[in-house]
Image (tube, rainbow, N blue to C red):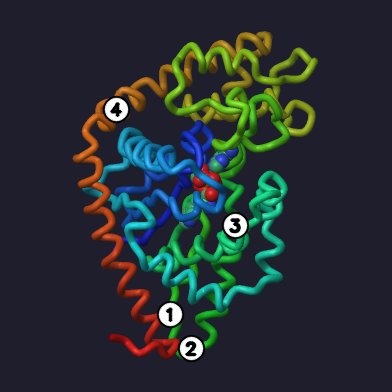
Amino acid sequence: MTKPTLLSGIQPSGDLMIGNYIGSIKNWVKMQDTNNCLFSLVNMHAITVEQNPEDLKKRTLDIAALYLASGIDPDKSSIFIQSHVSEHAELAWILNCTAYMGELNRMTQFKDKSSTHAQNINVGLFSYPVLMAADILLYQADKVPVGADQKQHLELTRDIATRFNNRFEQPIFKVPEPFIAPTTAGSRIMSLQDPTSKMSKSDANTNNFIGLLDHPKTILKKFKKAQTDSGLEISYDTVNKAGVSNLLTIYSVISGKSIEQVVKNFEGKMYGHLKVELGELVAEYLKPIQDNFYRIRKDEAELKAILAQGAKQAKNQAQATLQKVQQAIGFVLP
Ligand code: TYM
């Protein structure tokens, strides 16, 4: 039996934070043995917002090293930089001719980003979900493990694939299934200072997130400062106790205990206890990942060799799909 294909990616648009880890990487690591996995550094997506070129280069390699440091194994999975596989851009153009302006206009991420980057509402920002559809459909992916914020983009990918397939007698694309954990399992980690909005790696206020490479003292300080309510009881209630509930979710995912168990452990204790214990737990959990990161990041030649190998494997699969698409739509093949 062939293994299902799984694809996911992260934009090098900021330093990785704990929401990215819990919402995506942590799940990827577990899925590597039973799936044919491809994990991308989607740098073409990142430039929809202006990036400093040196920072973009460094962050792309940092995130690749963090994939490895977290347990993504290049012997099991292909790790690659999106721009190394030019088929992504080629398929995106073809899919641009299948996607409708109306459906892209409804994307909430586009609406959010065009309000935060009002002076740079570029065409790429608008058609970004089409590039994301190309990323996924190129590999005939069965599953796409992501956080809850990507649900709308995945629904659009499915619509584009289905519409494209319907033009032909034989389906060209596999219609992928989203793999999104429940929110109690961390698919939507919230900002520490504003627990009504999601934690984001591109947030200008670094107190809003725990960076995967944050120093233990910084981690503790950020959790201690996290916004909670004026109540006293530690309980899970995302409406009235959004801040505490977010801390409980992080505690539960990182400790491997259920939320009920965690709430029980903190019975009769104060918010301050939860914050300190959580800070210590997360710092200890991240320590081996950080140690691995600094070791792996030192050998840039080896890191680039892993990425070159990953791109080669990805390109093989991407070329086959692109050719199938080109043939179907009437492009003369060379
Ligand atoms: P990006 O780079 O914003 O985020 C990377 C992954 O982290 C998840 N995530 C979160 N999970 C839980 N809580 C949070 N606060 C949180 N913030 C981010 C995201 O859901 C994502 O899984 N468009 C994508 C990148 C992309 C992609 C793809 C993903 C491009 N092409 C193809 C999958 C397949 C994005 O902007 O993710």
Q: Residue at x 77, y 19 (%)?
A: 229
SS for dot 4: helix
Mark 3 crowdedness (10 Å alpha carbons): few <14, some 14-19, many ≥20 = many
Q: Quadrant of residue 244?
A: top right
What amino acid type should be assigned to the residue bearing mark 1?
Ile
Q: Quadrant of the N terminus?
A: bottom left
Task: Say whether disc 3 or disc 4 marks the residue closer to the N-terminus.
Answer: 3
The Cα atoms of the two marked residues, 1 and 4, are separated by: 41 Å
SS for dot 3: helix
The numbered mark at residue 295 is none
287 vs 60: above or below: above
Would residue 247 appear left or right of 310 to someone viewing this image? right
The Cα atoms of the two marked residues, 3 and 4, are separated by: 34 Å
Task: Say whether disc 1 or disc 4 marks the residue closer to the N-terminus.
Answer: 1
The Cα atoms of the two marked residues, 3 and 1, are separated by: 27 Å
What amino acid type should be assigned to the residue bearing mark 4?
Asn
The numbered mark at residue 168 is 2
Estimate the x, y position of residue 107 in percent, counting from the top left: 67, 59
Would residue 290 appear left or right of 98 to someone viewing this image? left
Estimate the x, y position of residue 126 in percent, counting from the top left: 62, 61
Which residue position holds label 3? 125
Estimate the x, y position of residue 113 in percent, counting from the top left: 66, 49
Which residue position holds label 1? 172
Task: Say whether disc 4 or disc 2 marks the residue closer to the N-terminus.
Answer: 2
Is disc 4 in contact with disc 2, using a CB cutoff of under 8 Å? no
Q: Residue at x 44, y 75 (%)?
A: 173
Which residue position holds label 4? 292
Is disc 3 in contact with disc 1, using a CB cutoff of under 8 Å? no
Is disc 1 in contact with disc 2, using a CB cutoff of under 8 Å? yes
314 vs 50: above or below: below
Is disc 1 in contact with disc 4, using a CB cutoff of under 8 Å? no
